[in-house]
Amino acid sequence: MSLENTLAESTIEHETYSSVPDGYRPGKAKFIVVTGSVMSGVGKGTFSGALATLLSCHGLKVSPVKFDGYLNYDAGTLNPYRHGEVFVLEDGTECDLDLGSYERALHANLTKDNYLTAGKIFKMIFDKERTGKYLGRDVQFIPHVTGEIKNFLRELAVKTNADIILVEVGGTVGDLENSYFVEAMRELRYEEGKENVMFINVTYIIEPDSLHEYKSKAAQIGLRQLMALGIQPDVMICRSQTPIPYSIKEKISIFGNVDLDRVYNLYNFSNVYGIPLILRDLGLDNEILSILNISPKGNGNTVLNFENWKGFVDKIKGRNRDIVVGIVGKYTNVHDSYLSIVKALEHSAPYFGVNVRIKWIEATDIEDGKITVEESLLNVDGVIVPGGFGKRGIEGKIAAIKYARERNVPYLGLCYGMQLAVVEFARNVCGLKTAHTTEVNPSTDCPVIDIIPEQKDKLKNSEMGGTMRLGGYPAKLKEGSLVRNLYNKDVVIERHRHRWELNPEFHKTLEENGMSLSGVYEERNLVEFIELPNHKFFIATQAHAEFTSRPLEPNPLFMGFVHVMVNNYVS
Ligand code: GLN
């Protein structure tokens, strides 16, 4: 059946529902759908990110979509303790940390159109149903839910003008939560044809301890589940601890009806930045291009191309010493809560020939007196206080900031890390003993950090989702400041996710006592960057500068921070 016929209409007479956005041309964008089987956590996201880099280095425009099966509308209300960091896009979308991985892989800003949750699809469907858009039909999983998913992807193709839409299906094949999404992908292939839609399945080959040999049964069962859903993979990626024997590849090939040379084994994830080059050496790029019948468009763009990527990977290999960064946070036992910070440090370190080791310091341990601040920060080369919310652990963070300020230890404060640096400075330098943020002490007589009126109203109405100051805001950087020097720009855009702000009533006092308010969002007179000119490196920002860092374009604040630590080597 041709796409035109299938896409005809969805009315009482038709069983299909595939609306097609204006300007959509079938075959212009190709779709690569990545699914995972056997179990979660096999590296589907890491593989997909590496594939995105690889195809971009060929000059192809890749636009990714991560589908998340949870019913939350977005990730804004998710607890990082359970779910890892909430990533923020420039347009203010609060999303899963995988979108951060794709931005870093692609060196490109993504938008709300790259992020799809079950909650978002169902909200859209309920809204449409209430306004009569389904023309009297009973609204069903098939064709309506699957139809809206396909429409979302086609709209993305039109909006981005991408060569490739890379769809990562969250979860594992066989899950109830992603079943209708997998079905939508089956329909997409049926409607658009094999040359335009391909499937890659990432599976895991287990090696039980007691046997010391690889077993493919779990992978075979996963394949059966996928095929029972009507999906024939074109490529199989077999993840394993060490190289798998040829016989296992053969079994996967036979059971999955996949050519043997399209069964790949990826066993080494020790340097994730090297994976795009490993995939290229395996010839996966050529195989994909031939399946989809497309050609490379030259050697990538000016930043992301094979030469630069290889240069970065070589720098990682050439590192000869470690520096230690102490991250004083609250979710330090769930390292994914601070994933983008870890990545931003990882991006900067190779440019200075070093490796960054992170010492996770639980702020509540300092606060509760389980460990002294001196003990916890002994031998760290620099200190980061990251973003955070609420009361728990903040006196521990403030103690760490005081230590860094007084001992001239490089300090980088991010969001809450800036607000608490201001509280510390106000208390201990300006002599405002009762200084606080009203987030923790609403009745303080010295609210150096306070909530702006429009945020207060939202909180009153209990509007939690999507109501903070979110996304990119411009900051004008002060002539002669360290941040101005580091960014080498007058105005920078960094991303935000917070309700409280540095209270303008205290700007003057802080400045008179030696704090430089070195970056301001002028439209609202909100401070975005602070620094201490007499310190070796003491910078903090109201934004989450970690979100804009990329391997080939590390964030300037992190570059400056790592640079000063390297020159100031103590550990
Ligand atoms: N809790 C602070 C606020 O809401 C900081 C938020 C953050 O660090 N992301 O303003």
Image (cartoon, rainbow, N blue to C red):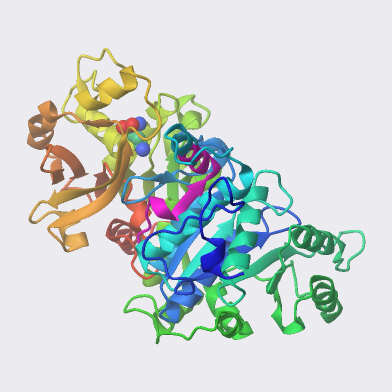
The quarter of the image holding the N terminus is: bottom right
Against 294, is 1 above or below? above
Q: Quadrant of ligand 1?
A: top left
Residue 465 figure quarter: top left
- Count of numbered circles on the image: 0
Q: Position of residue 164 (x, y in %)?
A: 47, 71
Between 443 and 151, the one lying in front of the other is 151
Between 225 and 434, the one lying in front of the other is 225
Residue 124 lies in the magenta-colored region: yes
Residue 42 shows up from this direction: yes
Against 399, is 435 above or below? above
What residue sits 82% from the left and 81% below the top?
246
The quarter of the image holding the C terminus is: bottom left
Q: Position of residue 505 (x, y in %)?
A: 11, 26
Extreme residue toward the front, this view: 13
Between 150 and 441, the one lying in front of the other is 150
Between 1 and 298, the one lying in front of the other is 1
Residue 286 figure quarter: bottom right
Left/right placement of residue 186 relative to residue 57 reads: right
Residue 101 lies in the magenta-colored region: no
Q: Which residues are magenta?
A: 108-125
Against 481, is 398 above or below? above
User: What is the magenta segment's predominant secondary structure?
Assistant: helix
What residue sits 52% from the left and 43% below the top?
84
Q: Position of residue 30 (x, y in %)?
A: 51, 72
Q: Position of residue 566 (x, y in %)?
A: 35, 63
Left/right placement of residue 402 relative to residue 324 reads: left
Left/right placement of residue 75 relative to residue 499 reads: right
Residue 354 figure quarter: bottom left
Residue 355 shows up from this direction: no
